[in-house]
Amino acid sequence: MRDRFGPGECVVGLDVGGTGMKGALLDRDLRPLFVARRPTPRGDGPDVVVSEIAAALTSLAKEAADQDLTVRGAGVVVPGIVDEDTARAVWSGNIGWRDLPLAELLESDTGLAVTLGHDVRAGGCAESELGAARGAKDVLFVAIGTGVSAAVICDGRPVVAGGFAGELGHLVVEPGGSLCVCGVQGCLETVATASAIASSYTARTGRTVKGASDVTTLLGEGDAEAQRIWDRATDALATSLVMATTLLGPELIVLGGGLAEAGDLLLEPVRTRLEERFTFQRRPGVVRAALGDAAGCLGAGLYAWRAVYDAPGTQPAESVEATVCPL
Ligand SMILES: [Zn+2]
């Protein structure tokens, strides 16, 4: 089977974020052959963003042609609510589109076969195939950055639910707390995102910090307010993870996104708080993501290759056996 797709073949993987896009040409083992980034012009509206995604795909396909590579298809992953089954970008607060047949639009613009996915679900699939969750069947992958979102993988399959599964950031962890962008008070996102941690510190002390990494630096210096805010965030995260574990029974929780760069500063208090609260639940391991910010792009490539293998006349997909180079 593998011989049917020769060394001169690749897919395009594209991870569309709120501020930037990360694209790559990926071979059958998801090794990057070429990587490119460009900004996401979200301030110009969703139509311009769609045009820019198409331009990114076209540019990557041209690069493939220049390298004498054959592009077998493209995977595009985006934030918000994404229904992979109907290939529609249902909603994005960040980019502003509503119920858009995005794969179809991109296919007609580029001539490429496009598989659409959700950025965090794709990242979770990449971590499962190639990264920190390799070999695990029941996984909760949590991406913590400007927001919090999760990929739920049960019995080896990602749970999609029309695109609505995995909104961990909107579990209420502090009833009556701060107002969330979703309109509810006290969601996890109001407490435990990188931006919430930074803005809490500034609000409490009057001192401006650039981001959560400044707060973790202050933690190391013994800053009491930084510690209080960090404890509150890790406590809220643990509260949400207890809820998710009780409902889903993951064997492994993988923490990714920018906040996971804090490493053991984040992992250790979360592990301790989970252990304090679990009674009968399955005890999941809690580990840091392995693929960093490449996870979404690699997941997009994984989707594209699966679509190639799932196409009529081909054999069922093999599991990717890869040694992934960092993008
Ligand atoms: Zn919310």
Image (cartoon, rainbow, N blue to C red):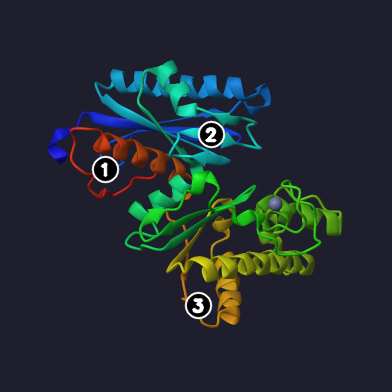
Mark pair 3, 2: CA separation:
35 Å
The residue that label 1 is drawn on is 29
In front of the other: 207 or 110? 110
Q: Quadrant of residue 14?
A: top left
Rendered location of residue 285, percent (x, y)? 45, 71
The vertical placement of 156 against 64, above or below, is below
Q: State whether residue 74 appears in this view.
A: yes
The vertical placement of 87 against 317, above or below, is above
Rendered location of residue 180, percent (x, y)? 75, 50
Q: Amino acid at mark 2?
A: Ala
The residue that label 2 is drawn on is 89
Work out whether mark 2 precedes mark 1 in sequence or the reverse, and give the earlier one. Answer: 1
How many numbered marks have been drawn onto this rendered protein structure?
3
Which callout, 1 or 3, points to the residue nearer the camera?
3
Q: Amino acid at mark 1?
A: Asp
Q: Residues within 10 Å of mark 1 (few under 14, many from 20)?
A: some
What residue sits 56% from the left and 41% below the top?
Answer: 81
What residue sits 31% from the left and 41% below the top?
Answer: 30
Work out whether mark 3 precedes mark 2 in sequence or the reverse, and give the earlier one. Answer: 2
In front of the other: 157 or 48? 157
The vertical placement of 251 against 122, above or below, is below
Residues marked 3 and 2 touching at CB (< 8 Å): no
Q: Residues within 10 Å of mark 3 (few under 14, many from 20)?
A: some
Q: Quadrant of residue 239?
A: bottom right
Q: Quadrant of the N terminus?
A: top left
Give the SS element for disc 2.
strand
* Circle on res. 281: 3
